[in-house]
Image: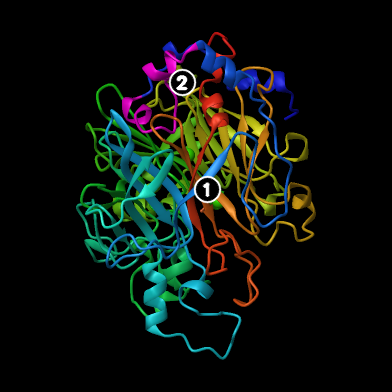
Amino acid sequence: MEYSRRNFISFLGKASLGTVIIPQFLISCGNTTNPSAEFKNTPKDVLQKLKGLALQAIEASDKDDLLLANGLQYDIIIKRGDKINTTDTFGDNNDFTCFIPFDEKNPKDGLLWVNHEYMNQLYVSGYNYRDADQIRTKEQVDKEMYSVGGTIVRIKEENGKWNVVENDPHNRRITAQTPIAFNWDRPIAGKTTAIGTLSNCSGGITPWNTFLTCEENYDNCFGEIKYDKDGIPARIPSNYYGWEKFYNHSPEHYGWVVEINPKDGSAQKHVALGRFAHECCTLYELEDKRVVAYTGDDKNSEHLYKFISSKPSSLKEGTLYVADTEKGKWLALDWENEPLLKANFKNQTEVLIRARDAAKILGATELNRPEDIEIDPITGNVFVSLTNNKPKGDFHGSILKIEETNGKYDSLTFKASTFIAGGEENGFSCPDNLAFDMSGNLWITSDMSGSSMNRGDKPYMSFKNNSLFVIPRYGKDEGKVIRVVTAPTDAELTGPWFSPDGKTLFLSVQHPGEQTKDVQNPTSTWPFDADNIPKSSVVAITGDLIEKMNKLQQIEGQES
Ligand code: FEO
Ligand code: CA
Ligand code: CA
Ligand code: CA
């Protein structure tokens, strides 16, 4: 699509806030809009001062550093290996972050959930797959399994700085060795409980204030089960970690949306949401308390799904649908009522375990790696990052806009269109995580792979390191794609999440130095601590620019 700012902003839309009801659970936990009383009553002189602060893009960078636009600063909250209590440490390759305050009236004290998607074996277990002579031990695999999953830590902001409350009783790890029950009435691959969660990429939050963590590239760990046309299964070994050589866990125990209770760490795997490479899970609560869950399968030419519950606050009772974006239809993955599914699968449980196969049988549309999904707080439209699809010649990806019919999230029809495409003319490539701030500005992180960035891979050279961008919705910069943070070498910026008062942007700096071949000679040493090795870390970004963006709607004095 040809891009122009005018085009863009009309695509984003400026419908009044009154036209869409954004559920309170999204508002009270940041990550979306609805100015609080404090925002609405911001004194004029403060608004005037913020107006004077220029929103200045930073240039693309290939430096090994976390660089921020003028008006932003960061502190590190926690790094790989940091102690969270007397027995546990923070895992590796932190991704999704989600903050829930203990008390809605105090946005500065609460629980932070962090996904640990995968790990750098060189630093976690010392295993080097390039060294053919190395014999891998179970102890090494145990260290790797401990370093993934997620972390709950209590964090508090004092004097403008967020710190982990060490040894707080809420602090805990969920790992690839934590038993987690399936929220389902039939066993999955013979078991009612899985061992562990892994490949936890992005996630979400529920209306009842629990965390959702999504199992994405699960086949890297225990491989996959593939079925032939007669439904005969065959085990495919994992291409990375090979944990199946040490633990006999079924691949079908992974690839689910997992819910974590922040208060006690209890967890469950939601079978009803299907099994595939879930990137995220974004919930909307309907007026009658039923929920709608959007979730994408981040793999080339896979699909976009949504679950609609039939009972209030349930992620079990309901129907899973898959998108036909060409016809604008949600297709039910419902074995009981769909003869095509009855002819190919034994029961609904098998349909959900093999959701990809079922989606293809129904004719769902192949998409270019659906990643993060956010609901636009101003218009209510659903935005889906499509990162890329190199085999199909899509190197830079795009963002898909879904308009549900009549703005009803439980509608079975919708309109799909391209909202904005990545590429040199728009200044970004490979959109991944999305977040809306309190003024409805859209924040986007990029995910160019470590093997493509700065290595002569032509489509990506000009973009240099992965970055965080913002698209303002108001004022003279409206519709521009503005680069505001650049990542250290080989890293990706993930998990953007605003604190409930909008003053802090939590952000993961994931996999700096990922292309390191020799631990003595790492490609990155960020965050430049005494160990002098790369460490994935969660940072808190604050500053006048964050405040300005959150208040942009008021500062520019425009009608919303
Ligand atoms: Fe783990 Fe789809 O990014
Ligand atoms: Ca991602
Ligand atoms: Ca998001
Ligand atoms: Ca990604």
Residue at point 53% right, 32% down? 383
Do callouts 2 and 1 mark residues in contact (Cβ within 8 Å)?
no
Residue on which disc 1 sits: 494
- In the rendered structure, the answer to whether residue 134 lies left or right of residue 337 reads right
Q: Is mark 1 within 8 Å of ligand 2?
A: yes
Whether residue 347 is visible, yes or no, is no
Describe the element under mark 1 as helix, strand or loop: strand
Q: Is residue 88 left or right of residue 187?
A: right
Q: Of the residues shown, which amino acid type is indicated by label 2? A: Thr
Question: Magenta stretch: residue 27 in it?
Answer: yes
Give residue 326's position: percent from left, percent from top.
Answer: 58, 33
Provide residue 282's location: percent of width, then percent of height: 41, 37
Query: What segment is highlighted magenta in the picture?
Result: 23-43
Q: Marks 2 and 1, Cα distance to the nearest angstrom? A: 31 Å
Rendered image: mark on residue 350: none
Instruction: Check mark 2 vs ligand 3: CB closer than 8 Å? yes or no.
Output: no
Give the answer, above or below, for where 99 lies relative to 475. below
Asked which secondary structure carries label 2, the reply is: helix
Which mark is first along the chain, 1 or 2?
Answer: 2
- Residue 405's label in the rendered image is 2
Foreground tag (2 vs 1): 1
Vertical order, 412 against 134 (above or below): above
